[in-house]
Image (cartoon, grey):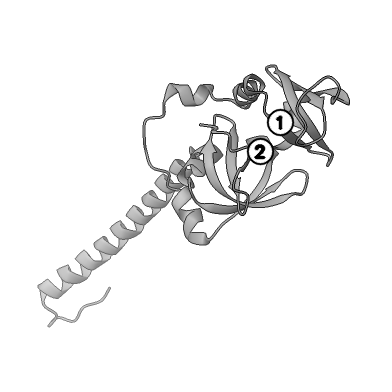
Amino acid sequence: MAYSRGVRWDRFFEDLEDQVASEWEAERAALDTEAERLRLSKVGLRARLEALAATSVSIEFVDGTVVSAEVSGVGADWVALAPQGARSAAIVAPLAGVVSIAMPHADVLRSARPPVAARSPLADRLTFGYLLRDLVRRRTAVAIQLAHGRLLTGTVDRAGVDHLDIALHEPGSPRRTSEVTGHRLVPFAAVAWVRIDGGVDLL
């Protein structure tokens, strides 16, 4: 930086201050960027889905099904959806069954900054298995879409820590011995999503 003899010292100090300020702004921007990266590294999919509560999204599942729905609830490892145009039906999917979630960019940004709130310890206990055991208690008829593409309809008889038992029968039929056509044990890992009819309150 060169100055003629006539340049006033105050101009010199102004330039120096501008240079220091510019370097400080660049350093602060770098720190902010790194802090943002660190914050995002701690945000899980569940937290982002919670931030999308009552938001319309389009979700693709591992079986290739794409559902346009509103996020109606989030458990420890599952999401509940209210499909568009289906008044009394709900879809529940383990988070492992979700392939992608489409939404407007504004919602993407909003979900990346979920509100900081104390999470109830009970919420961490609301696992996919817990939800299925509640369906067992209610004797609710379901349709279970498997990851490889097959659809099973019937009633969940039992739910263990990592699998369920389903008694197969036609949709809309009660679970009577005469109506049951077979039984299946299904690992949770094989489930893409579960459709529940009848307006069951999941949370």
Mark 2 / mark 1, whichever is N-terminal: 1
Residue drawn at x 45%, y 42% is 38
Residue drawn at x 55%, y 32% is 202
Crowding at mark 2 (Cα within 10 Å: few <14, some 14-19, many 20+): some
**Residue 163 can be seen, yes or no:** no
**Relative to the observer, which residue lies in front, 110 or 52?**
52
Which image quadrant: the N terminus? bottom left
User: Residue 196: which disc?
Assistant: none
Q: Position of residue 71 (x, y in %)?
A: 54, 45
Residue drawn at x 21%, y 71% is 15
Q: Amino acid at mark 1?
A: Ala
Residue drawn at x 64%, y 20% is 133
- The residue that mark 1 highlights is 141
Crowding at mark 1 (Cα within 10 Å: few <14, some 14-19, many 20+): many
Q: Position of residue 135 (x, y in %)?
A: 64, 25
Tell me the quarter of the picture where residue 155 sits. top right
Q: How many discs appear? A: 2
Question: Which residue of the protein is positioned furthest toward the right in this rendering?
Answer: 181
Give the distance between the C-alpha atoms of the residues marked 2 and 1, in whole angstroms: 7 Å
- The residue that mark 2 highlights is 197
Is there a contact, CB below 8 Å, between mark 2 and mark 1?
A: yes
**Relative to the observer, which residue lies in front, 193 or 30?**
193
Q: Position of residue 37 (x, y in %)?
A: 47, 46
Q: Position of residue 47 (x, y in %)?
A: 49, 39
Residue 141 vertical position relative to residue 177 in the rendered view, above or below: below
**Relative to the observer, which residue lies in front, 39 or 59?**
59
